[in-house]
Each structure stands twice: as structure tokens, then as C-alpha cells.
Image: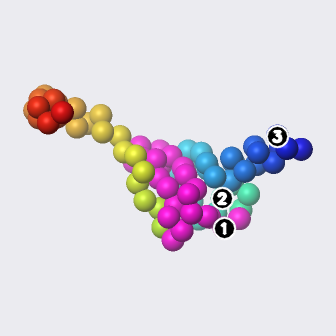
Amino acid sequence: TAAEAAADNFDDTYLGAKSSDPTVDNDGDALTAGDLYFNTSSNELKVYNGSSWQVAAADVSSLATKGFSIALSVAL
């Protein structure tokens, strides 16, 4: 039963991949601060702050242009 509870807790916190911002968790319960999901439309990991979804991580592969790479290398 402990493993089952841990799996359910994880499932309630990480909601998985979805195409738009969810309004409830995977059990149909209210969202809580710290919930996560991956937005497949925008390729972004989002976190729920208690009232709205915010981008936690974004796909930056499109930024890897030659000029940006050189600027980033110089900055580092």
C-alpha cells in the first residue's frame, strides 16, 4: 500500500504530457502549487504556482544559432 500511495502522489504531482494547460490533476482533483506537466504544443515544462501555470523549462534548441553560440561561449 505504501508503494501504491507513493505512485499516486507522483501521478498527482507530475501530470504527464498534455497539449494544453490542465485545470485538474490526473484524478480530477484541484491543482496544487508545484504540480508539473509537459506541454507538447509549446515543448515547455510548466509548473503550477497555485493560481496559474508558469514555464519552468523551455526548448532552447532553436536558439543554438551560430551567433548565439559564439555569444554564449564568450559570456561563459
Identify residue type, mark 2. Answer: Asp
Write down the residue under mark 2. Answer: 25
Q: Are marks 1 and 2 in contact (CB under 8 Å)?
A: yes
Which mark is on residue 12? none
Per the image, label 3 sits on a secondary structure element best described as: helix
Circle 1 residue: 30
Does residue 41 appear in this view? no
Give the residue type that dot 1 points to. Answer: Ala
In the rendering, at what x and y percent does residue 27 appear? 73, 57
**Residue 48 falls inside the magenta stretch:** yes
Q: Residue at x 66, y 67 (%)?
A: 30
Residue 55 or residue 41, whichever sits in front: 55
Vertical placement of residue 68 versus 25, above or below:
above
Give SS at disc 2.
Answer: loop
Q: In the rendered image, which quarter contains the N terminus?
A: top right
Q: Which residues are magenta?
A: 29-51
The label nearer to you, 1 versus 3, is 3
Name the residue at the bottom extreme.
51
Identity of the residue drawn at 61% across and 48% down: 14
The residue at the far right in this view is 1
Q: Mark 1 and mark 3 in contact? Answer it, CB < 8 Å.
A: no
Q: Quadrant of residue 22?
A: bottom right
Given residues 35 and 43, the one toward you in this image is 35
Q: Is residue 40 magenta?
A: yes
Measured in 3D between alpha carbons, the distance from the residue under mark 1 to the one under mark 3, in whole angstroms, is 23 Å
Q: How far across and down, in percent of the image, does residue 68 sit? A: 14, 35
Residue 3 disc label: 3
Q: Main secondary structure of the magenta part?
A: loop
Mark 3 crowdedness (10 Å alpha carbons): few <14, some 14-19, many ≥20: few
Res 60 visible: yes
Toward the viewer: 10 or 15?
10
